[in-house]
Image (cartoon, rainbow, N blue to C red):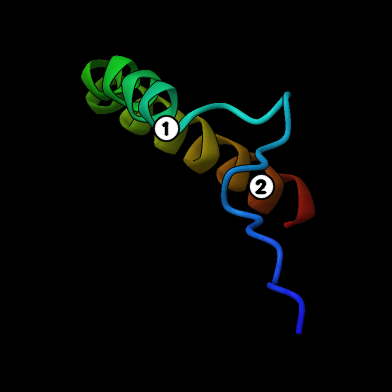
């Protein structure tokens, strides 16, 4: 019988390592409290604009 191939060591060359992905997420964490309210405000403005335009 043949031994099954081990696919865990064959990562794609363009795929980032797990450590790099966590570091980029940690870099974005400080700006999340600024970005979320700004995006929420823009979304509320757009929804209000659509409601006024349609009404």
The residue depicted at 58 percent of the width and 44 percent of the height is 9
Instruction: Identify the residue position indicated by label 1 in the image.
Output: 41
Q: Nearer the viewer, residue 26 or 19?
A: 19
The residue depicted at 27 percent of the width and 22 percent of the height is 26
The residue depicted at 57 percent of the width and 27 percent of the height is 16
Question: Residue 23, which numbered label?
Answer: none
Image quarter where the N terminus lies is bottom right
In the rendered image, residue 32, in percent from the top left (x then y), is placed at 30, 26
Image quarter where the C terminus lies is bottom right
Describe the element under mark 1 as helix, strand or loop.
helix
Crowdedness near tag 1: few (<14), some (14–19) or many (≥20) residues, C-alpha within 10 Å: few
Q: 37 left or right of 18?
A: left
Q: Nearer the viewer, residue 8 or 12?
A: 8
Distance from Cα at disc 2 to Cα at disc 1: 16 Å
Crowdedness near tag 2: few (<14), some (14–19) or many (≥20) residues, C-alpha within 10 Å: few
Instruction: Identify the residue position indicated by label 2 in the image.
Output: 52
Q: Nearer the viewer, residue 25 or 3?
A: 3
Q: Quadrant of residue 24?
A: top left
The residue depicted at 43 percent of the width and 28 percent of the height is 21
In the rendered image, residue 54, in percent from the top left (x then y), is placed at 78, 54
The answer to whether residue 55 is above or below residue 44 is below
Q: 54 left or right of 31?
A: right
């Amino acid at each position: 019988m043949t031994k099954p191939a081990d696919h865990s060591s064959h990562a794609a060359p363009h795929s980032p390592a797990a450590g790099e992905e966590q570091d980029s997420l940690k870099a974005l964490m400080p700006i999340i409290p600024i970005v979320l309210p700004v995006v929420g405000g823009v979304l509320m403005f757009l929804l209000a604009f659509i409601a006024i335009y349609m009404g």
